[in-house]
Image (tube, rainbow, N blue to C red):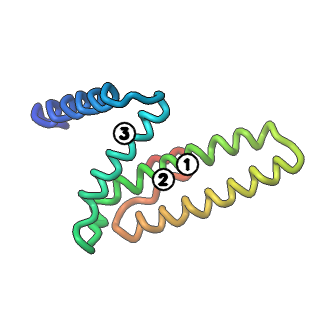
Amino acid sequence: MYSNDTNQISQGFDNFIGALISSLHASPEASKQAIVEILCKKIMNLIVNENEIDLYAARPYIKSVLTFLCKRKDSLTELLKSETGSKNKQIDSAIDDYNQVIQFFNNILVNTGGEKTNDITGKT
């Protein structure tokens, strides 16, 4: 359970995101991408110090990447059900590629002491 301080920090973070959105004069898609880029750089600053990587700190970030990959693979699987012909082969190939990348990131999680992520839901 989060403490009151943690809740206040979370609300402050939400305000920070709102201020970022307000300060960016771009399309909603471009604004989202810019905000994600800023946040990812901040996260990487927490994970990577000098030439050292804190794999323990990186696990939530890796889980986030896995969640994205799993959801994208699920979208492609749904698309595969409605396509036929050469498009079907391309989608099937992309799903195979996603499965390999998901397995790679799952191996990293397991090797850093984390739990394997379910490749369907992205949840452990």
Q: Is residue 113 left or right of residue 103?
A: left
Q: CA distance from mark 3 to mark 1?
A: 22 Å
The residue type indicated by label 1 comes to: Cys
**Picture coordinates of residue 31 (x, y %)?**
42, 33
Count of all numbered marks drawn on residues in the image: 3
Which comes sooner in the sequence, label 3 or label 2? 3
Reply above or below: 97 against 76: below
Which residue is at the front of the view, 98 or 106? 98
Question: In the image, what residue type sits under mark 2?
Answer: Leu
Question: CA–CA distance between discs 3 and 2?
Answer: 20 Å
Give the CA separation, mark 1 to mark 2: 6 Å
Please identify the quadrant where the N terminus is shown.
Answer: top left
Mark closer to the chain start, 3 or 1: 3
**Numbered circle sitting on residue 66:** 2
Residue found 62% across the figure and 56% down from its top: 98
| Mark whose residue sits in front, 3 or 1 | 3
- Residue 53 sits above or below residue 79 on the image: below
Identify the residue at image location x=26%, y=73%: 52
Considering every residue shown, the one lying at the far front of the view is 25
Mark 1 and 2 residues: CB-CB less than 8 Å, in contact?
A: yes
Residue ranking furthest to the bottom: 51
Dot 1: what SS?
Answer: helix
Q: Which residue is mark 1?
A: 70
Q: Which residue is mark 3?
A: 35
